Image (cartoon, rainbow, N blue to C red):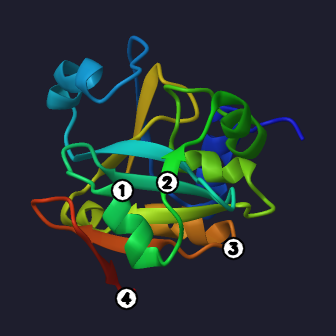
Amino acid sequence: MTPATPRDLFARFDALGIAHVTHQHRPIFTVEEGADLKAALPGGHSKNLFLKEKKKGRLYLLSALGDAKIDLNAVSKLLGVGRFSFGNADLLLQHLGVTPGSVTAFALINDPERSVTFLMDQGFFAHDPINFHPLRNDATTAISPADFLKFVRSLDREPIRLAFDADGLPTHVQA
């Protein structure tokens, strides 16, 4: 399957009646690199971690607010799974159709088999809009949290919602 393009993503948003605004910018590979750009864009900004359970190989995408502290060991314990490592570039391209630096929750559009479990920071709901790369790291797309959930649910998914405290410890949030 050929991965979706930003144009495909925006067409899906339009078909779902999701308002979206995209800002083009220089490529950004880390949260820190984009601090100046994020300061100029309203809303909550994301960091997205592509994770692999070390022993069983199960894949996870964790989308959290860019400034959230995250204790990955505590996340794995809360979920009752093995320790996490970061998924490699080949797995990322194979399962989410994006390259390192472009990891985004919008890449779930490229995982129709739902082989990647989606973990979402409840903190996004305190911001409007919320911002993610649109499958490339040279742009940022803003949508409302409600529309983000609408998009995720249109992919026949329900995120596992986690709330992170100041030390990065997670709690499970019921939707």
User: Quarter holding the N terminus?
Assistant: top right
The CA span between labels 1 and 2 is 7 Å
Please tell me whether mark 3 or mark 1 is closer to you in this view: 1
Q: Amino acid at mark 4?
A: Gln
Q: Which residue is mark 4?
A: 174
Find disc 1 in the rendering and name its residue. Answer: 72
Task: Give above or below for 84 relative to 132.
Answer: below
Q: Residues within 10 Å of mark 2 (few under 14, many from 20)?
A: many
Residue 10, by quadrant, is top right
Q: Secondary structure at mark 4?
A: loop
3 or 1: tag closer to the N-terminus: 1
N-terminal of the two: label 4 or label 1? Answer: 1
Name the amino acid, label 1: Leu
Do tag 1 and tag 2 residues touch (Cβ < 8 Å)? yes
Q: Are marks 2 and 3 in contact (CB under 8 Å)?
A: no
Chain-order first, disc 2 or disc 3: 2
Q: Are marks 3 and 1 in contact (CB under 8 Å)?
A: no
User: Could you tell me which residue is drawn at 38 percent across and 15 percent down?
Assistant: 25
Q: Choose mark 4 or mark 1, whichever is in front.
A: 1
Q: Position of residue 19 (x, y in %)?
A: 45, 52
Using the numbered discs, state the Cα–Cα distance from disc 4 to disc 2 in whole angstroms: 23 Å
In the picture of the structure, the residue carrying the numbered disc 3 is: 156
Q: Which mark is on residue 84?
A: 2
Q: CA distance from mark 2 to mark 3?
A: 25 Å
Decide which of tag 4 and tag 2 comes sooner along the chain. Answer: 2
Contact? badges 3 and 4 (CB < 8 Å): no
Neighbour class for label 4 at 10 Å: few (<14), some, many (≥20)? few
Nearer-N-terminus badge (1/2):
1
